Amino acid sequence: MHVIRNNKDVRRYAIGDVHGCLSHLERALEWCSKDAASDGVHAEVILLGDFVDKGPDTRDVVELLISGSPYSNLVLVPIKGNHDHLLHTIWHDPKYHLTGSWWENGGQQTLMSYGWNPLLDKVPGDLCDLVPREHVDFLEQLPVMYETDDLFFVHAGLNHERALDDQIEHDLLWIRGPFLMACHNFGKPVVHGHAPDTNNPFVSDYRISLDAGCYGTGKLAIACFEPGERIPRTAVVKRNSIEERPQAEYLRTVDI
């Protein structure tokens, strides 16, 4: 599902991969709300997917997103990541099984957040008794891309070998090297997560990368786009502080 919004007059924040880190997400939303309130505006917050796995609080993160914004001046717009896709796929089809790559890449932490005890409980044959259907339905129905007049928001990236109208879901959720290395001009910047880097947020003319590896680094990246702007201010939620950066110097690779 591809959502398009054409309102140029909305401030938009984007938040990188949360991966079950509830306290960082809560602090990021609080910062966005206060930042918007300081200018007397309402705003959208686009969350770039991978809400589940790796961190300790998958269940609580999903419940927060289902409940909607805790702040009256923010509207939450979550989009799907590859880990979110894996979770709802495995829930529906246990043969796509728990002991594969998902299990070794954060699946165990997700099950623990839903009450599974690795010291006392066997590996479940399926997830139906642990993960509520409401959570699975929510993840399954998330859009895979959010587009505005000025920006693309997507979890992983776009494939430069395909026309914009021919992009496929697998690439939007999973692509990495071909997108990151291509430096391709898609007509407007692509705001994405999926590629963790301790130096993120990375800002250029053609892409803005916001996965700071929160579950391992303790850093959650935020970008703030003023109406009509393509280059953001940024902030990083750390374990004990929030670091803000102005709309300033950035790596110029492609003029859009």
Image (cartoon, rainbow, N blue to C red):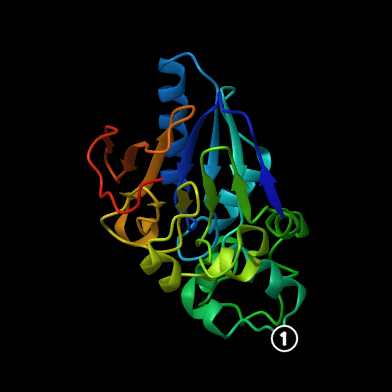
The answer to which quarter of the image holds residue 237 is top left
Could you tell whether 74 is left or right of 143 in the image? left
Going 40% across and 40% down the picture, which residue do you hit? 223
User: x, y (%) of residue 40?
Assistant: 48, 13
Q: Look at mark 1 in the image and give the residue it sits on.
A: 95
- Residue type at mark 1? Lys
Q: Is residue 60 left or right of residue 56?
A: right
Which part of the image, by quadrant, shows the C terminus?
Answer: top left
Q: Name the side, left or right, on which 219 lies relative to 56.
A: left
170 lies above or below 216: below
Q: Position of residue 147 (x, y in %)?
A: 60, 45
Q: Residues within 10 Å of mark 1 (few under 14, many from 20)?
A: few
Indicate whether 66 appears above or below 138: above
Which quadrant, please, contains the N terminus?
bottom right
> Is residue 82 something that shows in the picture?
no
Is the residue 52 above or below the residue 93 in the image?
above
Q: Position of residue 7 (x, y in %)?
A: 62, 29
| Secondary structure beneath label 1 | loop
